[in-house]
Each structure stands twice: as structure tokens, then as C-alpha cells.
Image (cartoon, rainbow, N blue to C red):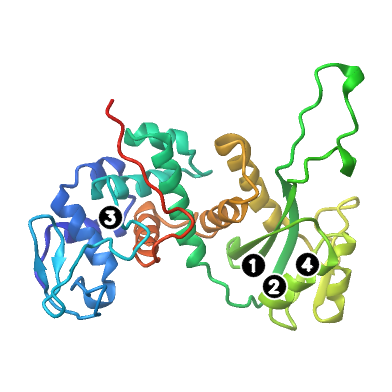
Amino acid sequence: MRNEPGQHFLLKSKSKTLKLKDVFKLSDEQAFDVFKSLRWKSTDGVPVCVHCGTVDSHWVLATRQFKCKSCKRKFSVTSGTIFQDRKLPLQDYLGAIAIITNGVKGYSMLQLSRDLGVQYKTAFVLSHKIREALMIHKNNFQMTGEIEIDVTYAGGKVKPANEKKDRVDRRLAENQSGKKRAVVSLSQRGTKGSKRTLTFVAKSENQRDINAIVKRYVAKRTIINADESSAYDILHANYKMKRVNHSINYVDPKTKASVNLTESFFSRFKRAYYGQHHHFSVEYLPFYANEIAYREDNRRKDNGFICYDILGKSLNSPVSSRMCGYWQRGLN
């Protein structure tokens, strides 16, 4: 197979740290080749018609669209993906993913809009499309081995009144907004840190939701580490439980039970919340949590691998039904 303009960059970036300056130096043709290689990876970059499924070296038009040699219909390298009906150059999408990849604790959409020189609305939609692609390709196979489970809360914060006499006890349910959610984390232990992290959103830390999540995503006879919360008592019937009482210690000296991996994940989750985004809406909280879990599981891999992995997942995700609007680049 001939060495196309984008292939050298693609192979080079997979073997070492990806540099943003290399991404933004790509020509339109090179970016097109990178997208084509990842969109049709199974056919070595040979286009597959999105209308009839014909695999062929279809005609390439001046607009960088393809015309199928079988059904004679047109399609592009982003047709049928979350980038369908795009209005920005391909370099911008590749650059956006590279920028997001470099954000260790996440990346705010306002900052992304400034880096790309686009409107905030454009960065908002693009970021959530990428999060949706990560959610679609989420590894939902049952976990085995040794698992840790824990819960943290996000959202629903009620600001205190200005005058002291008007302030109420915000810990009481009647004084809360109702938007507070529990983020449940399942961490599968590996040789170095967590091997895989799954996240779920529930209204509270309760036995019914915990039992449903664990029953669906954790194989039987798996060892589960949990804290002293009564929400995990129901799991003793089907799993080998190891409990740690945080009021006494963080690692049980006898059983070695701990939930330090999930606590480590939650620390990164909170840093993304407070340091980058400052707010997770209830509607998009599962997508934010899954994105941070993806970062957690791939934090030891180089930027080039993560960047092209995210791009590959995005190019193999269907058109978004949730984030279907888009906006043009600003004039200034």
C-alpha cells in the first residue's frame, strides 16, 4: 500500500507523545487521509459507501466527497458519523481532539472555544459529541477478579442566603434543589492501578440501585471491596465481600480491604468538576463521568494513542440524535 500523506504522521504519532504543533501543521489533504484511515480501518482506508456498503476506490470529487461506483450516490469521510454535516475544516476536529486529550483533568468548553477560535456553542456541541462517542464505545462487559465500589455526589448545590437570618439547613431534603446525584464507580484492580472503570448515576446510594448495577456488570464469585455503608450489605448474598470502616482505617490490616482506587478516581472527578467545568448538569452527568473514567483507564498511555483512539471511536459512532445542532465559526 502506498505511503499516503497522512500515514507517516499517523504512524509516527502512535509511537511517541503527540505534539499539538504537529497536529495544526497538517494540511487539508493530510487531515483527510488521517480521517479516511481511521474511518475505514478494517479496509485499510478503502472507502465503504454509506448507502449501499460497496467497498471500492470510489471517485474522489474536488470537494473531497466520494461518489459511489455502484449506486452513484455521494458521501464523505464523515457521513453517518457524529461529524456529519460538519461546517469546520477537518484539521479543527483533529486539533480539538488533540487539545482535549492533553487536558489531564478534563477540558472546559469555553477554553476549547478560545483555542479553536470558534463560538462557545460550537465547542459545547463538539465536546458533547465526543463524550457521546466515548459512551457508545463504553466497555460494558462484566468485571471479574477483584473490584472496588464506592459513591460520590455531584450537583444540586444550593447557595446560602445573603442574610444570616434567612439561611436554612441545606442538609435537609426539603431545602435541596433535587438535582443532587450519586455517581457510582466500579473499579477493576489491575497490576498498576485500575484496569477498568465503569460509572453510573443514581439518585442516592441505596441497596436497590447498587444491587442492580453490580448484578448486571460484575460476574458472580467476584471479590468486591466496599466501605461500611449499608447500601452494600445486600451484596453479601452473591459475592465475596471485603469491607473497610473508614472511621477506623482506610485499609483493613487483616483483609487488606480498601476502596483507594475508587477514591483516587473520585479525586480526579472532583478536580474536573471544580477546576475545569464548575458544573455538571443532571442530563449530561453520565457523559462527564464516563469521560473521566476513560481518562482514568488510559492515563498511562501516550497522547498519540489516546487522540487517535478517540477519533476512531468518533468516526465509528452514528449521527448524534442528542447533539444534532451546529453553528458556524465566528467572524472575528
Element on which disc 1 rests: strand
What is the x, y in percent for residue 15?
30, 59
Amino acid type shown at disc 2: Glu
Label 3 is placed on what type of residue? Answer: Ser
Sequence-earlier tag: 3 or 1: 3
Disc 3 from disc 4: Cα separation: 41 Å
Give the alpha-carbon distance from disc 2 to disc 3, as whole Å: 34 Å
Q: Position of residue 309 (x, y in %)?
A: 38, 61
Q: Earlier in the sequence, mark 2 or mark 1?
A: 2
Determine the image quadrant of residue 245: bottom right
Q: Nearer the viewer, residue 40 or 53?
A: 53
Q: Residues within 10 Å of mark 3 (few under 14, many from 20)?
A: many
Looking at the rendered structure, the secondary structure element under dot 2 is strand
Q: In the displayed structure, would residue 109 be above or below residue 73?
A: above
* Residue matched to label 1: 189
Question: Residue flagged by tag 1: what amino acid is it?
Answer: Arg
Tell which circle, 3 or 4, labels the residue nearer the N-terminal end.
3
How far is the residue under mark 4 from the one under mark 1? 19 Å
Say whether disc 4 or disc 1 marks the residue closer to the N-terminus.
1
In the drawing, what numbered circle is on residue 6?
none
Residue that carries the numbered disc 4 in the rendered image: 210
Q: Earlier in the sequence, mark 2 or mark 3?
A: 3
Residue pictured at 32% horizontal, 33% vertical: 117
The quarter of the image holding the C terminus is top left
Q: Is residue 17 left or right of residue 169?
A: left
Q: Residue at x 30, y 36 (%)?
A: 329
**Would you identify the image quadrant in which residue 143 lies?**
bottom right
Are dots 2 and 1 in contact, CB under 8 Å?
yes
Query: Distance of mark 3 from mark 1, alpha carbons?
Result: 29 Å
| Label 4 Cα neighbours within 10 Å, binned few <14 / some 14-19 / many ≥20 | many
**Residue 146 circle label:** 2
